[in-house]
Image (spheres, rainbow, N blue to C red):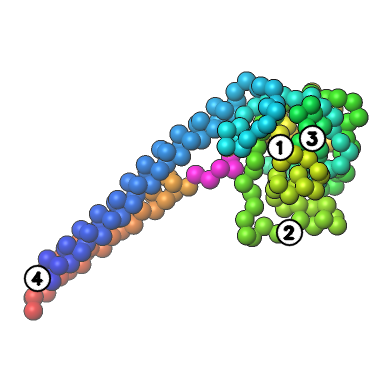
Amino acid sequence: MRRILFSLFALAGLGLLLGLGTWQVQRLQWKQGILATISDRIAADPVPLPAQPVEATDKYIPVTATGTIAPEALRVLTSRKGAGAGYRIISPFETSAGVILLDRGFVPLTAEAPAGHAGPVTVTGNLHWPDETDSYTPEPDLADNIWFARDVERMAQALDTRPVMVVLRDPTFDDGPVTPMPVDTASISNDHLQYAITWFSLALIWAVMSTYFLRRSRTKPES
């Protein structure tokens, strides 16, 4: 009787683990579809900057805009592969649609924040509202002008701009030491494959251990 109950328990556990693994495979396919859609949107042909960009519908779309880069700049602590630690440079960008935020790109820690551009420049980039802040994000060090995440709302308040950000992709002007860091999907987490492997591995271990205990129980008389 004990073997029957244990077998039912083992089968239920195995079914649960296999079900969780299958669910993660389905989630993986769903996430891959989302990432493909975002990648297609990022790489689309640029359009003029909308007069009233909205995050829900305009996030990631490529845009072009002509305006003046103001001399002010916020520095966001970050790192770049092959270059190490540095800062993203966020400046006000005065356009016909109003003053917005321009993510100009990366400079090393040792470089000075670049100045603005007095004359008009044309930029091509992607509209973006980064989701980088959570309860663990430190408050910005305003005295030293060091931010720890791109917070569009707070940066817009600090620089007196609209809460709209364009991340530079193809500069058509000399921006000194700044290297663009275009929008991509690398920062969007997609851990479903690892989760699926974990659940299927646990299912295999569960099956092996259950088989072992069942075989071992056969050598003992039932009470």
What's the magenta bit mostly, secondary-structure-wise? loop
Q: Nearer the viewer, mark 3 or mark 4?
A: 3
Marks 4/1: CA–CA distance: 67 Å
Q: Residue at x 26, y 60 (%)?
A: 13
Would you say the residues marked 2 and 4 are in contact, meaning their CB atoms lie under 8 Å apart?
no
Marks 3/1: CA–CA distance: 10 Å
Q: Residue at x 71, y 34 (%)?
A: 166
Marks 3/4: CA–CA distance: 76 Å
The kind of secondary structure element at disc 4 is loop
Marks 1/2: CA–CA distance: 20 Å
The kind of secondary structure element at disc 3 is strand
- Residue 126 position, x and y percent, is 66, 31
Q: Could you say which quadrant of the image residue 211 lies in? A: bottom left
Label 3 Cα crowd, 10 Å radius (few <14 / some 14-19 / many 20+): many
The dot on residue 139 is: 2
Q: Could you say which quadrant of the image residue 203 lies in? A: bottom left
Q: Nearer the viewer, mark 2 or mark 4?
A: 2
Kindly identify which residue carries mark 1: 165
Marks 2/4: CA–CA distance: 62 Å
Of labels 3 and 2, earlier in sequence is: 3
Q: Nearer the viewer, mark 3 or mark 1?
A: 3
Of labels 4 and 1, earlier in sequence is: 4
Q: Residue at x 72, y 24 (%)?
A: 64
Query: Is residue 46 within the magenta segment?
Result: no
Kindly identify which residue carries mark 3: 99
Query: Which residues, given as a range, are shown in magenta?
Result: 186-190
Of labels 1 and 2, earlier in sequence is: 2
The dot on residue 1 is: 4
Residue type, mark 3 in image: Val
The kind of secondary structure element at disc 2 is loop
Marks 3/2: CA–CA distance: 24 Å
